[in-house]
Amino acid sequence: MKYKRLLISIFLVLFLINLGGGLFASSTKVKITFMSTKGEINQQLEEVFKNFSKDYPNITVELIPVGAGQSPFEKLSTMYASGNAPTIAMIDPNDVEKFKDNFLDLSNEKWTKDALKGVLDDVTFEGKVYAFPFALEGYGLIYNKQLIEKAVGKFDPNTIRTRFSLERLFKNLEAKKVTPVVISPLDWSLGAHFITIAYATQSRDYGAVKKFIADLRAGKVDLVNNKVFNDLLDTFDMLRKYNYLKDSPLAGTYEQGAQLLAQDKVAFWFMGNWAWPLIEEVNPKNRDYGFVPVPLDNNPNNFFNRSIVALPTKMLCIDTKNNSKEQQEAAKTLLNWFVYNENGQKNWVYGLNIIAPFSNVKITPNDPLAKSIVEYAKAGRTFKIPYAILPSDHWPIIGAYMQKYLAGRMDRKQLLTEIMNYWTKAK
């Protein structure tokens, strides 16, 4: 009888491991909380958590959404101040180090060995991994191929390799009464996504990019005369010349951008693959979309003119201060479910339209924007923004400057001077 019980116990343990790639055998019910900073997938996350609880009936996951306009850093800081930190916090890469003393060391987790090369670099400190890379995302100029070809004929996105070639297409579209582009005036889009391209494209050597940021902090960089910044702003000036919102540049919303693109009102939209669920909701019949890079200059051999931004943009961290050991183990089980359980992978990738940054996850989202990013990645034509070393207030402050520039309330010299002043005062 003793041996029979032992065999049953061993079988149960093996079953639980196979079920979710992790082990959570507690007979007591555990509730964990999940702070989400990706509002566009909150509804889908709720469904994913229900499916997870079907595999693990003793674990329930409560979603805590971060309000529109509130940064992940602000929200998490407030929750720690009130002694009510979430079990799992979804935050930006640059915030991980600021909170790492509150986070669980995940270095011994199996998935650290299966993570794609480089995705853990910015969340590893003194050899310890403090975050789970949740989403590989990319951004650039999303094109509506169906609309473009209806207006001007065959369109090959690989022909857009310079600012000149992009503007030539814009002119052709405008001649056919098609508005070329919309710029959504969101501070996070302008301050975290657009202008940061100028940091990343200073060099193909990431170490040199980090040194550039350090020199900015030290006041050693003259951005007014920096070629890359001026090149990128020349492109921005061209984009706003053909902007759907040029008469009221600050009036647009995120939802409006998706609607304009999906309803064939504009041919291009500066945004990332996270926008796909909204685009599809507006027009589920058209799936002919993809990315072209934001060109810096008129050199067709410039690597960055042929490449898009792609990197893990959201990290999941497990709290140790306000959550019990049981809650921490349950949180690890959820992460392992994503990576190693077939049902978990499908929920993660298909349910949330997430590109999983793990070598063992072979499936990719069914949406065209994700597929476009994967194509760029396979061709070695991606680069990453140095988010991990940007201050937490970068996107709201620099984004506000970019909004003024977009609206013509600040000239280029003023913009670049304000960015330099920001960095010399940055914490």
Image (tube, rainbow, N blue to C red):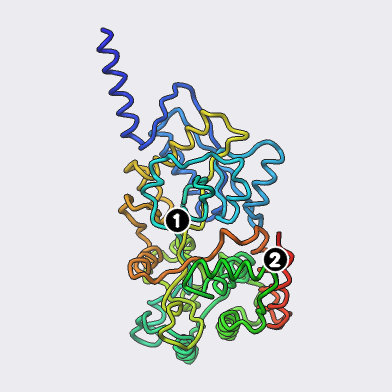
Q: Amino acid at mark 1?
A: Val
In percent of width and height, residue 6 lies at: 29, 15
Q: Is residue 360 above or below residue 370?
A: above
Residue 226: percent from the left, percent from the top?
61, 82
Above or below residue 393? Residue 80 is above
* Apparent side of residue 376 relative to residue 408 in the rendered image (left or right): left
Instruction: State left or right for residue 100 relative to residue 333.
Output: right
Write down the quadrant of residue 344 in the picture: top left
As drawn, 357 above or below 293: above
Q: CA distance from mark 1 to mark 2?
A: 27 Å
Q: Amino acid at mark 2?
A: Ile
* Residue placed under numbered mark 1 in the picture: 119
Which residue occupies 45% across, 27% down?
58
Say whether residue 366 is visible.
yes
Q: Secondary structure at mark 1?
A: loop
Question: Which residue, given by chain and number where applicable, does mark 2 sit on?
Answer: 397
Q: Secondary structure at mark 2?
A: helix
Q: Position of residue 329 (x, y in %)?
A: 48, 32
Point out the tag, 1 or 2, that comes first from the N-terminus: 1
Closer-to-camera residue (168/176)? 168
- Please rate how many residues cluster around mark 1, counting C-alpha atoms within 10 Å: few if below 14, some from 14 to 19, many from 20: some
Query: Where's the N terminus, which quadrant?
Result: top left
Foreground residue among 228 and 280: 228
